[in-house]
Amino acid sequence: MTRPSLLSASQPQGRGFRQAVRRATRHDHDTSEAGFAPFLEDPATHLPAFLAAQRGALDALNRAASGPPLPEMAGLIPALLDRLDADCAERGVTPPALVPTQSLSPLAVGYLVYGSNLGLAVIRKRALDAGIATLPRFFAAEDRRAGWQAICARLDAIDPDSDEARILTDETRAGYAIFARAAEVAFRGVPA
Ligand code: HEM
């Protein structure tokens, strides 16, 4: 990648697992972010591929989730999928069907879903700057800080040197890989 990723632009330090997982998976984030680079460079042209990739990845992430659901996740993924379905249908976009390769804990899924929402402000701005007058429903700004903070508190309750921490880090990597794969399929036509 020729430019620093947008996540790398802010690098808070901290000793808890919440910061540790961010540091350990930053490269994975940046690989996923790079997969979506065509959209960032030319949002109007690549909006259909962006929506297809997000829908395919979020659906695969949702199907990979296994374990007792977290209260702060209640209804969030179904609501996002509904918006993406409407956005895709309106534009005649067929999202890729991705098969998740492993199951993921609800906390890893929650971290990825709430965390990716942090990047949405950048994405929304790029789309508006590019003159996309009617933003997709998926881009709607919503205050999700309480949910994100609940996820961060759960992460910080985990001992960074524990097996649980290692498993969660691996699961987060696997989740990022789903988004990177979805982007390859949607933007570059790589078979699902
Ligand atoms: C267009 C592509 C993307 C852009 C521009 C982007 C941008 C960003 C930015 C700027 C942040 C930091 C926000 C902050 O600290 O306040 C962030 C965080 C994050 N993004 Fe992305 N992102 C992109 C793609 C993705 C994808 C595909 C995922 C997959 C789930 C993802 C997951 C996350 C997560 C989990 C965090 C939280 C990291 C942490 O603080 O622990 N992002 N992103």
Image (cartoon, rainbow, N blue to C red):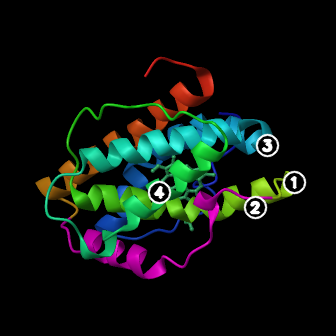
To which quarter of the image does residue 152 belong? bottom left
Q: Is residue 27 visible?
A: no
Relative side of 46 to 23, left or right: right
Q: Is residue 146 magenta?
A: yes
Picture disc at residue 21:
none
> Which residue, given by chain and number where applicable, does mark 1 sit on?
131
Q: Amino acid at mark 3?
A: Ala
The answer to whether the residues at label 3 and label 4 have Cβ atoms under 8 Å apart is: no
Q: Secondary structure at mark 2?
A: helix
Q: Secondary structure at mark 1?
A: loop
Residue 125 marker: 2
In-front residue for pair 93/39: 93
Q: Position of residue 52 (x, y in %)?
A: 55, 38
Observer-side mark, 4 or 1, equals 4
Q: Is residue 115 above or below residue 148?
A: above
> Marks 4 and 1, Cα distance to the nearest angstrom?
25 Å
The label nearer to you, 2 versus 4, is: 4
Q: Residue 37, how many percent across, how many down? A: 67, 38
The amino acid type of the residue labelled 4 equals Asp
